[in-house]
Amino acid sequence: MELRDKFGRKISYLRLAITDRCNLRCQYCMPAQGINIVDRTDLLSYKEMYRIARVLSELGVNKVRLTGGEPFVRKDFINFLESLSFNDKLDEINITTNGALISNHIDKLEELKINSINLSIDSLQREKFAQITRRDVFENVYDTFEKLEKSNLNLKLNIVVQSGFNTDEIIDFVELSKNKNIAVRFIEEMPFNGKGQRDMKEEWNYKKIIKHIRDYYPEIETLISEKSSTSKNFKIPNYKGNFGIIPAFTRTICNDCNRIRITATGMFKNCLFDGGVFNVRDFIRNGASDEELKQLFISTVHHKPENGFVAEASRGNDVSESMSTIGG
């Protein structure tokens, strides 16, 4: 048994949100006052998450990315990572974090089977960072960045390119790849900030970002990415690291999608842009067996939409949920 959709795509990658809570309030992710966080009993328990990951791994999912909110906000997250590491069917466990809370845990992450850390950092300037995140934690996050870069964990930087805020720093971020073995990833801004789409002065999409970088570096090398990669990747000759662009909103990467998402409250999503297909938390709490879970996952994945535009059209115009709720 394996997870395959009607377009023949094999699903092997789970994005699992640990919590909807976050210690930052990034403008593109949620409103200033935060979101209405759900009651703790509505969140998947670690035991339920472990079971979901194990059942999915028996269906061929071999890669898990743990997101939030901010996963390190949730108590006992490290213990959960430890238990997840015992699942020998998982080849990769990756984490997306804002870095504000993890500097004391880096040694432990190296010990466990953690493959890579995606660190969200949208500005290299303290004041601008505080303006974007609405929190003054830049020095803390940058310290985490330097510690992670020296660790044996693969490090990617996630930069959401925000019109009117940080487009003047794109080249500064590319320059970080000169002497550091990191992957810098520029992400098209998404509309999910919990109150509809943010007003943007101009659209910084994939084409505009790459043109901006090419104007500065005429000698860019295009890297061959794995088929299901979410980013189109490049390298400046003789630079230690590389950079890439994730066309998250223009969605030119959907054809090879191998992903599913489960939100912190257990909503199963075949696509970031769909409204959620069913609640796996309720199914588990109503007494579902592992076999019933498998059959549900198989039948649901079969109906995965061809791309994000199809998924968005089927859900209507509701983009008022927050990325923190979805699992960024």
Image: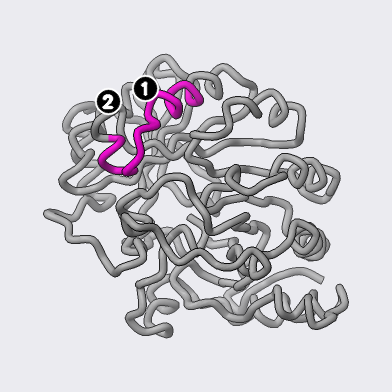
Q: Quadrant of residue 57?
A: bottom right
Name the residue rendered at 86%, 73% in the picture.
290
Tell me the amino acid under the disc marked 1: Leu
Q: Secondary structure at mark 2?
A: helix
The N terminus: image quadrant: bottom right
Name the residue rendered at 48%, 78% in the picture.
275
Question: Where does residue 223 sit, x and y in percent of width and height?
Answer: 44, 36
Residue at the spot of label 1: 176
Residue at the spot of label 2: 172
Q: Is residue 79 visible?
A: yes
Question: How packed is label 1: few (under 14 Cα within 10 Å), some, or many (20 or more)?
Answer: some
Q: Which residues are magenta?
A: 129-145
Q: Is residue 168 above or below residue 271?
A: above
Look at the image and say whether residue 136 sits in the magenta stretch: yes
Question: Where does residue 194 sit, x and y in percent of width and height?
Answer: 36, 66
Look at the image and say whether residue 309 sits in the magenta stretch: no
Question: Where does residue 8 sit, x and y in percent of width and height?
Answer: 62, 72
| Magenta stretch: dominant secondary structure | helix
Given contact means CB atoms under 8 Å apart, are the residues at marks 2 and 1 in contact?
Answer: yes
Q: Does 168 sit left or right of 300 as displayed? A: left
Question: Where does residue 92 sit, x and y in percent of width and height?
Answer: 70, 43
Tell me the amino acid under the disc marked 2: Asp
Question: How packed is label 2: few (under 14 Cα within 10 Å), some, or many (20 or more)?
Answer: few
Q: Nearer the viewer, residue 198 or 41?
A: 41
